Structure formats: C-alpha cells, structure tokens
Image (tube, rainbow, N blue to C red):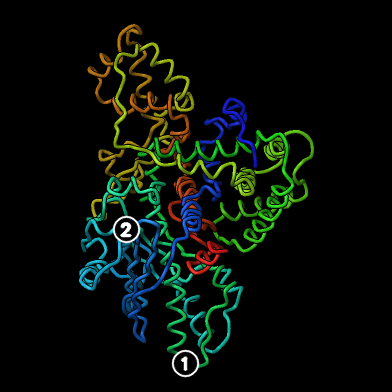
Amino acid sequence: MIPTPLAADVAAFRRPPEQVMRLARLGSAHPTRLSFLRVLLRRMQAERWTFDRPVWQIDSKGVGRAVYRAKGPERTYSLIAFAHDLPDEMRSDRVIATAWDATFALFDGTPTTVDLDRLQANVPLQEAGRITRSELALSRANRSVRLFAHVVDRLASGQQPDRAEIEAVGYLMRTTAVYGSGKFGAADRAAIAERPELRAPFQAEMLSVWMTRSFTVDLVEHLAAVKGGGRAVRLDQDLRRSLGVGNSTGLGMAPFLIRHPTLLNNWMMVREEALARIRAQPEAQPQACADFASALQDAILNAQSWVSDHPVQVAKLSHLRADLARIAAQGVPSGAFPWNALWFWAEAHLSLEGQEALVSLMLEPHGALVDGLSDCMDADEAKAFALDGSETVAAFRAGLAERYGWALGTDYDAPQNTAWFWYVSEEKLEPRLGERWQEDGAALELPIGIGRMAYALHLALVDWPGDQPLARFLMAHPEHRLMARRVQQSVRYPYMEIQDNLLAADMMPIDILRCKLACFGASHFDPRSDRWLRISLFQGQPYPDELAQKATE
C-alpha cells in the first residue's frame, strides 16, 4: 500500500499556476490515467459492466441501424447507430456539413422499436432534427476513406490489413461533433450529474465514442463478409486494439475553458495534486519503477507512430522522441524522493513537450495513490459565485495585482495585442475568430480576452478610494462585474485562468484545444491549421468484450 502524504507535505511539491497555466505548456499536454476516458473504462471494469449488440439491421451496402448496449449495476445505456450511403463528394469534416457516413445517439436505457423509428427520422439530420431527454448525446462520423476501404478489401480477401496503413491513420471513422448537455433537446447535464457513473466530466460523451469504436470495426467486418463471402476473415485482435475513433475539432471547443473557469481549475488542480503526491513520495517502489519503464516503452512506440505535417507539431514530435530517449537513459534516480529528483532533472533538460509527457508517465504506475482524485473533477456551476461587495477596493486591488499580474503589463493599445476577437457564428451558433483590424464584427465580441478585461478593471480602479466597498465601485461600473467575479473566484480556484493574452496575434487556438482534448484522453494530436486539429480517442484501449473479460479475471 502506497502511503498518501500529508496535505501540507504535498503542497510544497505542487507546481504553481503561473508555471502550469501558460499556453505553450497547455499546448503540450498529454493524456493521463486521470483523463476522462480512462476514468470511464476503470469504472466499468471495476463494476463489471456487461455489453451486447441486440440490434444489427445493416444491409449489404452497409446501410441501416444497430444498437450497442452497456449495462451497469443500476442503469443501461444504448448507443444507437445509423449507417448511411454517403457519396464521396458530400463527405466533409466541416461543421456546416449536412450528411455523414454515420450518425449516433446515446439512449438512456434500452430503446424500443418506436424509439428507434423516432430517432431514425431525426438523428441523421443532426442539428436539423430534434431529440428528447431520453437521449444523452448526439454525434456523427465520417469514414477515413482510404483506410476504411483498405481494411474491407484485405479482410474480404482473407488477409489482414497492412499494419503501416493502420498506424498512419489510426481510426476507421472520425467524429466531427459529439453533442451533449441539452443540445437539440438532449437531457441537460443537471438531469444526470448525480449518477455516479456520469458524475465525472463528459462521461456520457466518452461512452458514446467508445461504443462507436465497436461499431466501426463491426461495420468493416460486415462489409468484408458481404464482399468476400467464405474467404473473409475478422480483424486481428492486436490490429483492432490499435484503432481508435478519430475526431476533428475546431474553434467551437476553444472558449469552453474560459467560460467554465471552476471546471478548468478542477481539471488542472487534480492533475497537479496527483503529480505533487508522486513527487512527495520518499522512495520509489520496485513495482512502480517497473511499471514506469513499461509505460515509457509504450510512449516511445506511440511517438514513433505519431505523425503530423504541421510545422509546429513536427517540431514538437522531434523534441518528444528525443526527450523520451533521454528519460529512458536517465531512469528513476536512486536516493531520497526519487520522483521529485526525476522531475527537477526534467525541468532542466527536457522541452515542454517532454516534461508534460513525463507527467503522464509518472502518474501511470501510481493508480492507488491518484485514481481517487477523479472524483474531484466535476464542478457545480449552477451555484453562481456571489460577488462579495463588502470587500474594500484596496483589498480587491491588491488581489487583482497579485493574481492577474500576468495581464497587467501588456499594452492592449498595440494592434498586435488585440489582433483577434472571438464571436459566435450566426449560421452555426459556434465560436469563431475574427481579425479585428481587417474584419467587421468586433461589436459582437465574446468576453474571452480575460487579460484585457483584467487590465481595464485595473485602470478603472486606479483612482477609486481604497476604503470604499467594492459594491459601490460596481454600481458605478457594472461593466466590470464579470471580471470582478473572476478575480474573487481566483482566490479559491487558482488554476482557473489561462495566463496568456488570448487576443494576441501570435496566440494559437490549437494550444487551447490540445489542453482540453488531453483531459478527455485524446492522443496523436495532428493540427491541420492553427485553428483545428485531428486526434484519436481510445486508441490502444480495450473493447467491450476485452473489458468484460478483464473484469472477470
């Protein structure tokens, strides 16, 4: 049993927000055992969930519907999949697409034929359709055309797909959106938040994507059997495990972390607490060292198969591969507090990419010490944080300077420091970026530039009497209420702010996206521009039949 250090001891090992919450580091984040999809898989295995496929009505062209069912100790959830015959010219990852290779809904319970018929009339329409509180998530996916066809052809001929082809892509289908939390009529988050299995963030969405992965494999095997008849074979289990579900993610996801500060704080705080607990261990257990070495070898293999054409990611991959080799050569030091010594060595010798990969590696062998922290990642955002208007302006001003000093030294009159503005697209109701000095629309700007807002609040407070209550200032300047609330929130939630200017010309949204997606458990980040990227989910993780088998071992 690994002893849990005293809270006072752990705090001394925790990285400060000003180190952690910078875009360059957040944009180098890696998935960990505390990522949401790993939390989901551990729970289902521990609780011995069972899985089946009660409906498979897919024709010889790969068109039809199927149902995948996950049965927990108290409730059942069903993924309803609709497969379509999509012409190549209609296949697009753009959010403005209107047709997809497959569409999905996560159903609360076991659907009846009436439910399936209702959903078949709506789910393929996605935003243009409507679902009900019986549905927890809505999603769609497109085939990775070249790999999908390759796998079908090879299996149909009695052969296994080429491993290099599979590693180059990593998925048979990629989702272009996974909607939950009340969108288009789905159940609100509040309706399911108290369920233990869905309490952690995005568990319904992760369950939907995980079962979608099974559907993608079943579909290629079905089409291979249709094409090859008796010659057809099933996909090799090892190759199957190397396939995940792809995802194309753009700007729509980026503002989430700014608009949900307490949630972001909890995600980051849990990870930093986990790392601090490990660094606070006075010695390294032999089994932990062995598991660390195994995880490191897996990471080296993963980095070898991770490809990207984006120049930023190409450089990061070069650093990552070199850094993993350095970690392997260094090993876990001997002596007192070896994990802490390893961390200090990493800060001195590794890139940010390598350092954040090491965070993941150090957490991996310490499940008994850190897994319980996953219960602390949700946030009750319905309880609005009330402003304390009785705080004096002097005390508030001091807190602003202390916790937002990173924002107060920037010249926001310089065009390069306010080059972007965030707004919501009228067509798709999705966040977008505009170029402030070239495009109209800045009057519709979203409150995403927290640094500039903090600076404006600082200027407004400069000549205000320090002995007066904050309430009096806010009555005169209600436009600063949002930022004032964030300043007071930051006392309790120190990791709630990205400590960089999100309006600056050199800001890259893919850094924000990677931070959030790493929390999900995504891997193989592949930027397609500075504004959107592709990733893989559940690659290397067990399928339902494997998870059920592990639970009974």
Q: Which amino acid, mark 2?
A: Ala
Q: Position of residue 264 (x, y in %)?
A: 43, 39
Viewport quadrant of the C terminus: bottom right
Where does label 1 land, which residue? Answer: 229
Q: Quadrant of residue 417?
A: top left
Q: Residue at x 39, y 35 (%)?
A: 262
Where does label 2 land, which residue? Answer: 137
Q: Is residue 101 left or right of residue 364?
A: left
Q: Is residue 337 left or right of residue 538?
A: right
Nearest the viewer among 480 and 129 is: 129
N-terminal of the two: label 1 or label 2?
2
Q: Position of residue 456 (x, y in %)?
A: 35, 24
Viewport quadrant of the N terminus: top right
Q: Residue at x 53, y 67 (%)?
A: 549
Label 2 Cα neighbours within 10 Å, binned few <14 / some 14-19 / many ≥20: many
Q: Which amino acid, mark 1?
A: Gly
Label 1 Cα neighbours within 10 Å, binned few <14 / some 14-19 / many ≥20: few
Q: Is residue 89 above or below residue 140?
A: below
Check disc 2 and report its element: helix, strand or loop.
strand
Nearest the viewer among 442 and 315 is: 315
Do the residues under discs 1 and 2 have CB atoms within 8 angstroms?
no
Q: Position of residue 201 (x, y in %)?
A: 40, 47
Q: Quadrant of residue 125?
A: bottom left
Q: Is residue 74 left or right of residue 129?
A: right
Q: Position of residue 109 (x, y in %)?
A: 30, 62
Q: Is residue 369 above or below residue 244?
A: above
Nearest the viewer among 375 and 506 is: 375
Check disc 1 and report its element: helix, strand or loop.
helix
Q: Is residue 432 left or right of residue 416?
A: left
Q: Quadrant of residue 115?
A: bottom left
